[in-house]
Amino acid sequence: MSIRVLFVASSYPRFEADSASIFLRYLAENLHLLGVSVTVLAPAGTSRQHTLDSPVKVHYFGYFPRRWQRVAYGSGALLNLKRNPSLWLQVPAFMVGMSLGIRRLVKQAKPNILHAHWIVPAGLACGVNNMVSTLPTIVTGHGADAFALNSPWLMKLKHFAINQSTVWTTNTNATAAIISSPSLKTPREVIPMGVDVKRFMSGNRNRLRNDLSADVKIILFVGRLVEKKGVTHLIRAVSELSQADRANTRLWIVGDGEDRPALEHQVDELNIRAIVKFWGKVDNSSLPDFFAAADVFAAPSIEASSGDTEGQGVVIIEAFSAGLPAIGTKVGGIPEVITHNKTGLLIEPAGHTNLKHALAQLLNNDQLAKQIAITAQQHAKENYDWPVIAGRFKDLYQRVMTTPNSLPPQP
């Protein structure tokens, strides 16, 4: 039986260099390689330019006058709404636009499965559709929709969306635990998001290190510069490394976000501008070279004041794939990705002292760093490569369509 899936998402890349929810593009295109027909519904941005070169058909729905459509993209819907509360006025129109888009594409593309990415809003829109439809539906929680949307009425909406679905998935058990409730009767599976292991193995170590001597070691951070990423703790930890370590170490911060001005000010106050470089947002295609140039990867994530944190930490798996030893914190789904002293170092969050010691350990123990990197890379190949993850979703689609009673019960 042919599998035709309609992805419904609250963001999706709009052009080749767009990194918005790029993991969904990789998932969709790897499913296509496995013979699954995928159509995507996602919100439009402020531009009319949607120039994605992809075998997957993508439909962008409008929900407000184009130049004011700012609920999605940028820093992400949650932070956009937090930073600009007036955007809440667009949310009802956003939901209507998404719901109408689902109805239209169900008729046009004739999918035999709906796959909602993020429980709210996509899962909710698909749940409403399922009140008048019998399409099998999968709802996937990615993290922010679990950790940061926990008011009683939003939890009720999430539980409604899940109970209207055939099965729901999460990227880690930690994400599922935040949402799980005795009121949920729908079966659940844990399927993580993946990475393109070969691409991250192919970086050029020398391209970005031309101005550095061979003995200089680079600590790398990649991600949005927002509270939950914990970059302020990383900067403080680097500032407190021994004088000898600081002399031969550089901190590269790749990414942009609302916290960047405060982080740059912190670097100046700590008088470490000479060893810290803010690269800003870089093209996704150049990321393998950043990982290849580095010697240690740091993901100092914390739980933000909103409750949001890392659902999985895909960037850590990108570091694994590049053969880079990683440090992560015991928040969200990160402990399910890093096994301490085996695939990385796992430390307590929201503090710089433990992070400083972990950095010094990897900077000064080449044997440990190399062994961790080898083990982590093999772990990524076996468990997180996109063909592996896409294969797991294809298997789930087949079971949903043919033997839904074989799905595991809600834990």
Image (cartoon, grey):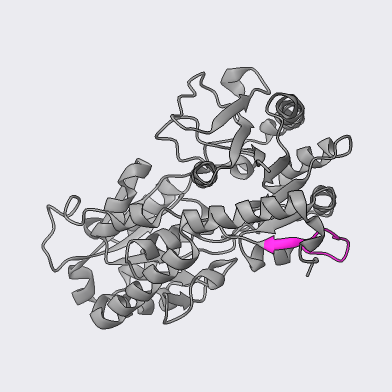
Residue 315 figure quarter: bottom left
Foreground residue among 359 and 317: 317
Residue 98, image x, y percentages: 71, 30
Residue at screen point 78% across, 70% down: 411
Residue 148 visible? The answer is no
Q: Is residue 211 above or below residue 24?
A: below
Residue 195, image x, y percentages: 45, 55
Residue at screen point 67% across, 47% down: 118
Residue at screen point 77% across, 27% down: 103
Foreground residue among 97 and 110: 110
Residue 38 figure quarter: top right
Q: Is residue 356 left or right of residue 394?
A: left
Residue 19, image x, y percentages: 45, 40
The residue stretch that appears in magenta:
179-189
Looking at the figure, which quarter contains the N terminus?
top right
Foreground residue among 113 and 80: 113
Residue 366, image x, y percentages: 24, 79
Q: Is residue 83 left or right of residue 360?
A: right
